[in-house]
Amino acid sequence: MCALSELQTGQDATVVGLRADHDFVQRLHALGVRIGRSVRIIRRGALNGPLQLRIGTTDIMLRRTEAALIDTTEPATAQT
Amino acid sequence: MKRIALLGMPNCGKSSLFNRVTGASARIGNWPGITVDLMRARILLGSHMVEVVDLPGIYDLNGYTEDEQVVRDFLCAQPVDLLIMVINAAQAERQLRLFLQARTLGVPIVVLFNMADEARRLGINIDRDAFTEHTGFSAHSISAKFGDGVPQALAQIGHMLGNTVPSMPSFDALADADLEHALDQLAHQSIDTPVTLSARHTDRIDRAALHPVLGPVLFIAAMALVFNAVFLLGAPLQEGIGAAFDWLRSAALVPLLAPLPAWASGFLIEGIYNGVSTVATFVPLIVLFFFLMALVEDSGYLSRAAFLMDAFMSRLGLDGRSFVMLVMGFGCNVPALMGTRIMRARPLRLLTMLTIPLSLCSARLQVFLFIGAAIFPAVWAPWALLSLYLFSIAAAVLTAWLFRKKFASREPFALELPPYRLPTARHVLLRGWHEVRHFVHRASRFIVAGVALVWLLTHLPVGVDAASTASWAGQIGSWLQPLLSPIGIDAQLTLALLFGFVAKEVMIGAMAVIFGQETSALGDTLAQHMNIAQAYSFMLFTLLYTPCLSTLATLQSESRDWRFTTLAVAWPLALAWGVAWLAYTGLSALAH
């Protein structure tokens, strides 16, 4: 298990845990970030800026501090 | 009359559908029980007159943002016959979550899977029969952008309205609804998504648009393009309209009003007509500006700006969305202030609202265009204007930085990056048209009253020389002189500033009346009246001093806090005086 914020750019991993408060978990759910879903970091914003994530057909941006609250599986190394 | 409300998540194409269905007939409407304006229109569906209401796009019927509260308040206060649930078909597996909440309300719902063409290109297939079988709600595939499937969907909705009664939704079952499990099940039953998605053109554009170096450069270039296009295309139109107004005045109005007593024709021609026609020449610029802003907004590019700027904004206690609202404020501060409703944390929302009135809006732009052209050499004028935009941004940054501790917040930042879409001309024109009509409506109320009042103040008491120190206007100006002469603003210009508080659009009209000049001659008079240091100080003061009356009213209605509204008036005024003083003393010293 690792935090989403620590994933390499371009790697796929599966969400296994959301450690945020209730309201933010609801918002993440509405944006498609849910346990069991596959997620990928498309790019990292410059100067410690937000992450661009892809979940299914939706792209979202999320700050690194919030991405650290999302647990994922170890990335599948075969898919690099 | 029947009532239908449009419900959907952000980026589902709800507004496109609303515009397609209602056309140019939509109006901003007010409802008892809710404090905000929503778009509404009356249309004929089948044999029913139907009021269609466009609710704000929301993620969660149970959520805590102001937008989500607005939707709940509306549904609790206004009985609806039917809800149209708009879902972006390409993102149905996630957006159906809102449908699962909505179906607990106990109101008839028709589901429209929008952007069917985009979903098809991605290989996503929605089985509407299976959807209806499992949920009991009828569904249609449409493209709100191109109109495919819309007539059929409307025909069925018109048919259904024969059996509906207006009802208040019940929110009792909403909190208990099992969403995540039900969503997986529904998606499994009715949505067919390919395992791998094809590379999208959006990714290719983003490689440049979100590039750490190229991205900001492109953003500045895009904004520069918008402003330049406004001037290049708008200036000839403006001159043409100005000339037409002057001709109408000398050819028709003056002979026609000649039989009237001098004071009456003076009031009508030098007061109302000169003032209003001066303002009217700016309408083409404003129209162009709003069309271009609608184009930028609908393309999906603004959320890229949010991505690029979030790292910087977070250091000021703001976030990427605050930056987007500041850019929107370049059009008009009022909708930008309303746009902050998507923010959940109140301190973040208030801090953003404190910075928005410093955005150089299109009304202030008129003043700067006029003074810039009248007083600065032609080569300098564009740079003077650009420097004012930079001052506007710097003032917002400084304000946020100074007040970031007072309005400290920790709101999680999560925002969609929708794919780039080329808006249709029809949609941009309609969006622009709605903005323009709203703008003209708002401006016209103040302009006629404003210029009439200026004329009276400059011509009373009876018998004084127009705008002389003996007139009421001159007296008001003299009282304020101790405050404004240190920044190079004389009594006559003080009066223009006073009316600028009502609406910045009034300022040029007020000057036309104060100096008793028509559009073209006013520039020459101004050039004799003030030097470059005075003009620049005046423009800086105008940029920052106080938000207009509409903005002030919006600040109060959105914050519902008099102390905050007072701060939002007092702080910019102090900042304006300080900045104008520095500029005036500095430029005057340079000139000697």
Image (tube, coloured by chain):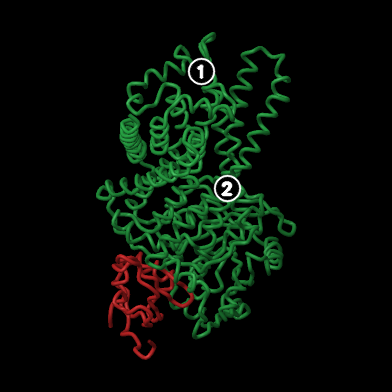
Chain colours: A red, B green
Residue A50 in the image, given as x and y percentages of width and height: 35, 67
Residue kind at label 2, given as amino acid type: Leu
Camera-side residue of A30 and B50: A30
Q: In which chain is the residue bearing label 1?
A: B
Q: Which residue is mark 2?
A: B232
Neighbor class of circle 1 (other Cα within 10 Å; few <14, some 14-19, many 20+) is: many
Name above or below for residue A70 compared with residue B151. Answer: below
Do residues under tags 1 and 2 come within 8 Å of each other at their CB atoms?
Answer: no
> Where residue B70 is drawn, which disc sits there?
none
Q: Residue furthest right?
A: B47
Give neighbour class at mark 2: few <14, some 14-19, many 20+ (Cα, 10 Å).
Answer: few
The image shows residue B199, relative to residue B384, as above or below, that is: below
Name which residue type carries label 1: Thr
Residue for point 61% across, 14% down? B263
* Residue identifier under label 1: B458
Where is the C terminus of chain B found, in terms of image quarters? top left
Name which quarter of the figure residue A79 lies in: bottom left
Q: Position of residue A75 (x, y in %)?
A: 33, 85
Residue situated in front as seen by the camera: B65 or B532: B532
Q: Secondary structure at mark 2?
A: helix
Which chain contains the residue that carries disc 2? B
